[in-house]
């Protein structure tokens, strides 16, 4: 029964959003149809709310998962009022590609070196395999024609070793009464260079680091229901609208004006910010319905409140009257 109700809600919202997109030119033909904004609001108001039975079932399940919660208020409390505070979550994702170069210094073992006189390609001219959109990743690719052999390692000056100040040191075990062999140089007074690994020469080349990143921002409309907004970050919603393109256009004429304003602001900010430092490959924006129902009930003559929220019917009950934080009592 609960699933059937949610399906009805989602279908009605999707029909409404599709109609709005057609009205505003998103449907392909740009037809204005016969719909007026007042009719759209009537459709909003006609969406069925959560039933008392469904709310109580979710409440009982919530209490049963709490080790020291008594079940009688959830099972027998008198539900006196239910208010719907359905809200929306807007999300904008911008999938970008960035490239930067790095200098590589490796020991030279005598291998052939790409020392062609050809001009090295620019970092953005190097072909790469782009992952599926909105899947982060990284590749490091060597830039052709940038290798050269340095005759002297910058770490050891071409000696292949570092000379230590002394080949002995005071023994910490005997408090200075004896001497011990240096573990770093085995008593030779020299250690192998960590840059060229004793080869005396290094190969210097350039690589390009390619990173793909999904830059994501979300905004949830606060309906002042009393439910902590952070709770909504933990639950899924029902997708009402999705739009993707290299550069998306802001949402227009959605019934919640803060969603429209947020879409306009984030789209503008993302396109300005990420186009300066990276290549924007794809953008995606979504609007989700987040159902919230505030339920007031009475238990032993006193009013209490719990919330049912999200499509998976999560429950929050801060002032549950039969909660016990200790493990030595029996809650009735």
Image (spheres, grey):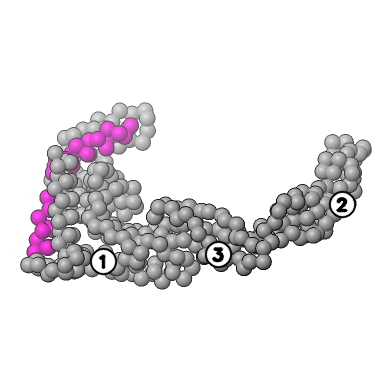
Give percent across and percent down for residue 299.
18, 39
* Magenta extent: 38-67
Question: Marks 1/2: CA distance?
Answer: 68 Å
- The residue nearer to you, when weighing 112 against 180, is 112
Image quarter of residue 100: bottom right
- What residue is drawn where x is 51% and y is 53%? 138
- What residue is drawn where x is 83% and y is 40%? 183
Give percent across and percent down for residue 137.
48, 52
Q: Residue furthest front?
A: 117
Callout 1: few (<14), some (14-19), or many (20+) C-alpha neighbours within 10 Å?
many
1 and 2 marks in contact (CB < 8 Å): no
Query: Closer to the N terminus: mark 2 or mark 3?
Result: 3
> Does residue 290 appear in the picture of this structure?
no
> Does residue 5 appear in the picture of this structure?
yes
- What residue is drawn where x is 59% and y is 62%? 101
Q: Which mark is residue 123?
A: 3
Give percent across and percent down for residue 152.
80, 59
């Amino acid at each position: 029964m609960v699933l059937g109700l949610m399906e009805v809600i989602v279908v009605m919202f999707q029909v409404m959003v599709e109609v709005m997109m057609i009205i505003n030119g998103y449907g392909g033909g740009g037809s204005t149809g016969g719909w007026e904004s007042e009719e759209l609001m009537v459709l909003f108001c006609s969406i069925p709310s959560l039933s008392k039975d469904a709310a109580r079932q979710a409440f009982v399940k919530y209490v049963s998962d709490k080790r020291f919660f008594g079940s009688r208020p959830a099972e027998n409390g008198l539900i006196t009022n239910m208010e719907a505070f359905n809200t929306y979550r807007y999300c904008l994702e911008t999938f970008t590609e960035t490239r930067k170069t790095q200098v590589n210094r490796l020991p030279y073992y005598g291998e052939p070196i790409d020392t062609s006189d050809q001009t090295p390609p620019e970092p953005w001219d190097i072909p790469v395999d782009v992952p599926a959109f909105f899947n982060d990743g990284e590749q490091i690719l060597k830039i052709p024609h940038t290798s050269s052999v340095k005759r002297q390692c910058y770490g050891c000056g071409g000696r292949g070793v570092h000379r230590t100040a002394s080949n002995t040191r005071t023994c910490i075990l005997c408090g200075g009464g004896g001497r011990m062999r240096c573990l770093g140089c085995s008593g030779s007074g020299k250690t192998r260079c960590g840059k060229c690994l004793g080869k005396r020469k290094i190969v210097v080349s350039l690589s390009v680091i390619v990173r793909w990143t999904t830059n994501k921002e979300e905004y949830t409309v606060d309906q002042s229901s009393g439910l902590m907004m952070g709770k909504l970050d933990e639950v899924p919603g029902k997708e009402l609208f999705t739009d993707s393109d290299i550069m998306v256009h802001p949402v227009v004429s959605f019934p919640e004006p803060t969603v429209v304003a947020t879409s306009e602001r984030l789209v503008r900010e993302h396109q300005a910010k990420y186009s300066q430092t990276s290549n924007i490959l794809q953008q995606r924006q979504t609007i989700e319905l987040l159902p919230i129902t505030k339920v007031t009930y009475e238990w032993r003559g006193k009013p209490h409140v719990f919330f049912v929220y999200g499509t998976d019917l999560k429950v929050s009950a801060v002032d549950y009257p039969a909660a016990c934080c200790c493990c030595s009592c029996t809650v009735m």
